[in-house]
Image: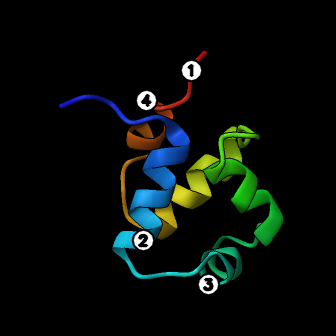
């Protein structure tokens, strides 16, 4: 399986749970605009934010981190 980019992975996981950006925003306490930028690939989140997202989305952080191009 091809690894998805972080932004694609994030959007896929959020949509899989049928959550809006607003819902995810409340759960991870990150602004909707920032989350939208993450999903659009305009912004890369901090490690702390990736850990929060992985917890809320119930996936290992490595699943999200794999999509971040170093």
Occupied quadrant, residue 12: bottom left
Mark 3 or mark 2, earlier in chain: 2
Mark 2 crowd level (few <14, some 14–19, many ≥20, 10 Å Cα): few
- The answer to whether mark 3 and mark 1 are in CB contact below 8 A is no
Label pair 3/2, CB-CB below 8 angstroms: no
Q: Quadrant of the C terminus?
A: top right
Which residue corresponds to the image point at 66% horizontal and 40% vertical from the top-left?
A: 41
Nearest to N terminus: mark 1 or mark 2: 2
Name the secondary structure under disc 3.
Answer: helix
Label 3 to label 1, Cα distance in Å?
27 Å
* Residue underneath mark 2: 15
Where 58 falls versus 18 (above or below)? above
Which residue is the site of mark 3? 23
> What residue lies at 66% left-to-right and 48% top-to-bottom?
40
Looking at the image, residue 69 sits to the left or right of residue 9; the answer is right
Relative depth, front residue between 37 and 45: 37
| Residue bearing mark 1 | 69
């Amino acid at each position: 399986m091809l690894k998805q980019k972080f932004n694609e992975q994030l959007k896929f996981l959020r949509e899989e749970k049928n959550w809006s950006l607003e819902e995810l925003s409340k759960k991870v306490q990150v602004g909707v605009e920032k989350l939208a930028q993450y999903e659009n690939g305009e912004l890369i989140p901090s490690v702390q934010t990736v850990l929060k997202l992985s917890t809320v989305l119930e996936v290992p952080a490595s699943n999200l981190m794999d999509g971040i191009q170093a």
